[in-house]
């Protein structure tokens, strides 16, 4: 589903450039859950943003479902940046859930979930409403459809954000530390929704510090540090029997 090859990302230029990703290679199988672990500043979130074309890569390639993201290659092998409208179309196939919920404060939960299908895909408001109601029910908020974000807990707002991402029928879901801004007692309700999505076969890449979730749900665990993948494999290998000293040190602090 996702092929990341030799991806570099630098912010800035010349001597002041910050090299955040340093030749990342990653394969994500269709229908699998890949969890990315690592300390702050290791490049985890930047990798997700590059997959979703929110950041332009400096070198390498990212292919999602057979389509190269952000670029086309001409007959001479020269890469050309795609038009922003084409990139926006590519991005529609990918749902992303951020640390902060980014809900529209002046819209109800129902209106937040309806907005993108109506405005971006041209769906009728009636069909969008039906779909939004189904999704809010799915994330356990069928009784909160008319509530505004300020009337919802952090966990409820994040579940609305997940429903909003699902409203575009994505082929791939990206989660960027979706529980890190939540009070501890609210984390479980968001993880439960994510587990449900995984059980339904949604392809997911999840950046998180929730080791229990990684151990229980992930098919593949990646540990990143300083812009590179240090170690990857099955949860039992990476989490329970890490081979690399840097992985061992990280897990010793978080477990």
Image (cartoon, rainbow, N blue to C red):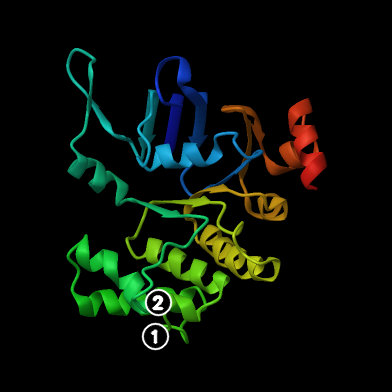
Instruction: Count numbered badges in the picture.
Output: 2
Q: Which residue occupies the foreground of this view, 120 or 75?
A: 120
Q: Residue at x 46, y 21 (%)?
A: 17
Q: Residues within 10 Å of mark 2 (few under 14, many from 20)?
A: many
Give the secondary structure at mark 2. helix
Answer whether labels 2 and 1 touch (C-beta < 8 Å).
yes
115 displayed left or right of 140: left
What mark, if any, has residue 224 been given in the picture? none
Question: Which residue in the protein does label 2 denote?
Answer: 109
Q: Which residue is mark 1?
A: 146
Q: Residue at x 39, y 85 (%)?
A: 146
State the image coordinates of residue 85 (x, y, percent, origin top left).
18, 44
Earlier residue among tags 2 and 1 = 2
With respect to residue 218, does 159 lie above or below? below
Give how far apart the Cα atoms at labels 2 and 1 are: 6 Å
Circle 1 residues within 10 Å: few <14, some 14–19, many ≥20: few
**Does any portion of residue 44 appear in the rendered image?**
yes
Taking the view exactly as shown, the residue that stands out farthest to the front is 16
Residue 177, given in percent of the width and then of the height, sits at 57, 52
Q: Quadrant of residue 67?
A: top left
Secondary structure under the numbered disc 1 in the rendered image: loop
Above or below, 127 relative to 223: below
Residue displayed at 40% across by 67% down: 103
Question: Where does residue 98 sit, x and y in percent of width and height?
Answer: 48, 55
> Which image quadrant is residue 252 in?
top right
Question: Height in image: 166 above or below 56?
Answer: below
Residue 49 in the image: above or below residue 24 = below
Point out the residue furthest to the top here: 76
């Amino acid at each position: 589903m996702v092929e990341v090859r030799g991806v570099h990302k630098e912010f800035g230029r010349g001597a002041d450039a910050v090299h955040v990703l340093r030749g990342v290679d990653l394969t994500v199988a269709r229908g699998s859950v890949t969890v990315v672990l690592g300390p702050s500043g290791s490049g985890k979130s930047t990798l997700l943003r590059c997959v979703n074309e929110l950041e332009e890569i400096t070198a390498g390639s990212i292919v999602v479902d057979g389509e190269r993201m952000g670029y086309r290659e001409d007959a001479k092998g020269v890469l050309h940046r795609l038009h922003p409208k084409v990139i926006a179309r590519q991005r529609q196939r990918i749902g992303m859930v951020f640390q902060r919920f980014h809900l529209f404060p002046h819209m109800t939960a129902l209106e937040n979930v309806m907005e993108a299908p109506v405005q971006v895909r041209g769906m009728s408001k009636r069909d969008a409403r039906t779909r939004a109601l189904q999704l809010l029910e799915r994330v356990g908020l069928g009784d909160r459809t008319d509530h505004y974000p300020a009337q919802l807990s952090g966990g409820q707002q994040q579940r609305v954000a997940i429903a909003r991402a699902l409203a575009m029928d994505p082929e791939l879901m990206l989660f960027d530390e979706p529980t890190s801004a939540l009070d501890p007692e609210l984390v479980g309700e968001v993880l439960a929704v994510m587990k449900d999505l995984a059980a339904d076969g949604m392809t997911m890449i999840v950046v998180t510090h929730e080791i229990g979730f990684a151990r229980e749900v992930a098919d593949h665990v990646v540990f990143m540090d300083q812009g590179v993948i240090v170690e990857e494999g099955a949860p039992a290998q990476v989490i329970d029997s890490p081979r690399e000293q840097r992985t061992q040190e990280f897990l010793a602090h978080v477990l």
